[in-house]
Amino acid sequence: MDTDTSSLLHPVDRDELQSWLRSSTLEQGPAVRARILLDLDEGHAPDDVARRQRVGRATVFRWKARYLEEGIDSLADRPRSGRPSVIEGATVERVLHLTKERVPAEADHWSVRLMAEYAATTTWQVRQIWEGAGLAPHRLKTFKISNDPRFAEKVVDVVGLYMNPPANAAVLSVDEKTQIQALDRTQAPLPMSERTSEGRGGHPETRTHDYRRHGVTNLYAAFDILTGEVIGRLTRRARGKEFLAFLRQVDKRVPAELELHLILDNSSTHGTPEVKAWLEEHPRVTLHHTPTSASWLNAVEGWFALLERRALARGVFTSVSDLKKRIERFIAAHNKHSAKPFKWTQTAGKIIAAVERAKEKSQN
């Protein structure tokens, strides 16, 4: 069991905010916002931060959310409402040229403040220009293009099962969610409160940012695309042995008169000699593999996201057993109240064309 404390601020941002507070010309608004975030970063509870900085609790949450969404540049004062400012064409051209053609000497990407300095303009104008041009150099999204030599063949196979499943068959999307942590907060969360007639309260649920780990579990799940129901199995480890046990469980749950088509990824645990031997003894089971680096093609991933959002992300678990019970209750409730047929709308041709365009763009 250990305690893990996660920081709110990026180390570079923490140094920057501390340098703000050392400035004798810093205005009151940005100074208060900097102290709010530094207090939160040090582990102070929002209520404590509000008292220390003499602001409302909602103000603390507002600036925390704005920092997480827009970064440190969002803490600067923004122009007040009134007659809209006019940005000169030369300024727009200068900002766009710098954004697309150059990188600042002191960083690996542009921030609003850096661009304002280089372009000799204001942070507000930089934001307006970037927003108008659809540019966000301070943000980064990751992507990975599948290089599977059988990409098109696998996409056609899997999408075909989604859009036109065979008769007298069950089609199940299968995967494992490994290393699910049983996290227990160091203090009990504070429940949300309604706003009183005097205007007090109205706070969201709050919890500590640090936690204790009590262990992990692994979940094997099979999502039935025709019904939306899920077959689940919780295990201590995630090896070929556990996957084979899950296959046997699925085989028992699905009526024997139905063919069984399983959509799954290319994990090494899915192709062990024991698994292959079992498949030879059960000819009604056919495996359909998604392309490498294409987990988005596996329907069960959407259900895993639902599980994470509704049952795990805000959960407090005092033991692995407690975590397992929560997952089992979620599966039972989903199958009883929420399960519905899975609908796939994107054709294989459109997917293949989109990936080819992405490959061409990445090579230019």
Image: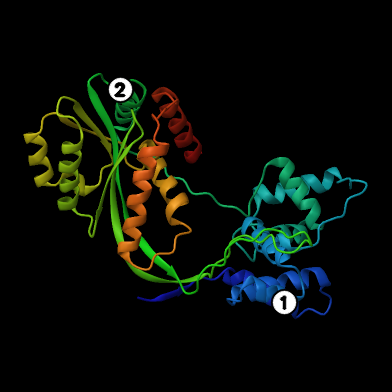
Q: Earlier in the sequence, mark 1 or mark 2?
A: 1
- Residue at 72% x, 47% y is 130
Residue tagged 2: 165
Q: Given the image, on which type of amino acid does mark 1 rest?
A: Arg
Q: Position of residue 190 (x, y in %)?
A: 57, 67
State the residue lying farthest toward the right. Answer: 83
Count of numbered circles in the view: 2
Left or right of residue 283: residue 224 = right
Whether residue 100 is visible, yes or no, is yes
Q: How is the image coloured?
A: rainbow
Left or right of residue 245: residue 130 = right
- Residue at 65% x, 53% y is 102
Disc 2 crowd rating (10 Å Cα; few below 14, some 14-19, many 20+) is: some
Depicted 306 relative to depicted 212: above or below = above
- Residue at 26% x, 43% y is 266
Q: Position of residue 43 (x, y in %)?
A: 58, 76
- Residue at 44% x, 33% y is 355
Residue tagged 1: 51
Q: Quadrant of residue 68?
A: bottom right
Q: Given the image, on which type of amino acid does mark 2 rest?
A: Pro
Label 1: which secondary element: helix
Along the viewing direction, whichever of 275 and 71 lies nearer the viewer: 275
Label 2: which secondary element: loop
